[in-house]
Amino acid sequence: MFRFLFAFGLCWICSGQSINPTSKPIWNATYTDLLKKDLLIGYDKFARPAQHYNMTVVSVKLTIRHVELDEDKSVFSAYGWLASQWKDEKLKWKESDYGGLTSVHMADHELWQPDLLLYNGATGTLTDMYGNSHCIVQSSGDILWVPPTHYQSFCQLDLRLWPFDTQECTILMGSWTHHGEQIDLQINDKGVELDLSTENNQWEVTKASATRHQKYYIPNPEPYLDVTFNFTLVRRSPMYKTVVITPAVGVILMTLANFWLPAQSGEKILLNGVNALIIVTFLTYFAQRLPSMAIHTPLVVLFYSSALYMVSFSMIISVIVINLSKTKQAQAIPWYLKRVLDGCFGTVLGLKRISVLAPKQQIAEELRDQPFDEHVTSDDHHIIQSCSKGPIQQDYIILATAIDRVTFLIYCFVFIVLAITYSV
Ligand SMILES: *[C@@H]1O[C@H](CO)[C@@H](O)[C@H](O)[C@H]1NC(C)=O
Ligand SMILES: *[C@@H]1O[C@H](CO)[C@@H](O)[C@H](O)[C@H]1NC(C)=O
Ligand SMILES: *[C@@H]1O[C@H](CO)[C@@H](O)[C@H](O)[C@H]1NC(C)=O
């Protein structure tokens, strides 16, 4: 037992010796190994690699590969990479000392990097923004770092012109902790480049720009720098054109057609009801489809809701018109109304034709229906009464038709006004 323990201990010591860090590796170190060891001994990657009174110039250029816009959350996402360059005063070497080695690759966690973060970021997490990727270090200390990025920023959506809207989204980037005298943020080339690998099928990026801003916050003497990337997104809307605009035109036409149905026809109510149903269906669709947090109500929705008001009002007019023309009236229409209807006003509205073409047969039929009413006393008496009522009834039908025609003209005017208001 004791001998076994002794052998075990000896074995442990042997294995400990074999991983002794002071022993040299069995492979020969390359110039890169030597260089990295020499560069990184005592290197503090959290210290800005320049004297505190010197600036570190960081130049950036964003390449966009794909964009997305989440309308419900108002979040704009940009996928791409951010090419950033700066000079590290500590990572310099003489090429001849290392076999003519001009550049070396280092992992991004091995050396100092500018803390470029989004000021209007939609994700609080800072580390997820850049993927891990290596840096290329030149012997002059110039560093190139091109990490893949996924920027997410809040974008104030303006859906007033939906579905023909254009959105302006910005990415505001800057050093999180350094001011302008420590890190001088510069734009490389134009600052932003569109290289869309997969087009977004809902949005088209029509413009992208980058601008550098320098701001002073009063008590501090140092400037604060940021780079603003602006993107103009245009909604691709061929589908919405047919789905949203065509029904609107249909509803207008049907509402107007309603006024040309004969004054006595009960189908007016039916047509209005169908119209109202279509509009309500669309309003429900909009409520489902559109985000509720937009500051403006889309004009299309306003148009549909005013159309619903108009159809409801048209329903009231229809009820009045049908009531006037179908109910048996005891009194003749007031003389001034009759004079107006018989005058040139009636000619303009085309009411004269109705007087001529008024279906006498129909009136006769209505008279025949009369016996079913409760106030039937004597047939002779009744027929005399009805005959005397005939022309009165016709006047009411003409009055009802006049109301229809006038409302038609008003509706035409209102729809034109609405269309002009909502198409600008
Ligand atoms: C390491 O370098 C020495 C001398 O230059 C050479 O003799 C040896 O073969 C090398 N070893 C390996 C593993 O390359
Ligand atoms: C650092 O600042 C000093 C003083 O302003 C200047 O002389 C020197 O050239 C600067 N060094 C670099 C690398 O910019
Ligand atoms: C970028 O967007 C901001 C905020 O929307 C705006 O103030 C600025 O004028 C825009 N810049 C350019 C160059 O379009």
Image: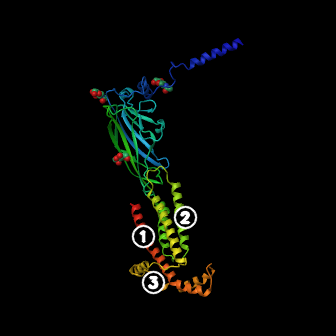
Residue underneath mark 3: 353
Task: Please identify the quadrant where the C terminus is shown.
Answer: bottom left
Marks 1/3: CA–CA distance: 22 Å
Q: Residue furthest top?
A: 2
Could you tell me the amino acid type at mark 2?
Leu
Image region (quadrant) for ligand 2: top left
Name the residue nearer the viewer: 288 or 401: 401
Name the residue nearer the viewer: 52 or 237: 237
The residue sitting at 55% across, 64% down in the picture is 277
Q: Nearer the viewer, mark 3 or mark 2?
A: 3
- Dot 2, crowdedness within 10 Å: few (<14), some or many (≥20)? few
Q: Disc number at residue 277? A: 2
Query: Residue 57, how many percent across, how many down?
Result: 34, 34
Query: Residue 251, how many percent across, how many down?
Result: 49, 67
Say what secondary structure mark 1 lies in.
helix
Q: Nearer the viewer, mark 1 or mark 2?
A: 1
Name the residue nearer the viewer: 151 or 25: 151
Q: Is mark 1 within 8 Å of ligand 3?
A: no
Say what secondary structure mark 2 lies in.
helix
Q: Is 271 rendered above or below residue 369? A: above
**In the rendered view, does 259 fall on the left or right side of 377?**
left
* Badge count: 3
**In the rendered view, does 7 fall on the left or right side of 190?**
right
Q: Is residue 359 visible?
A: no
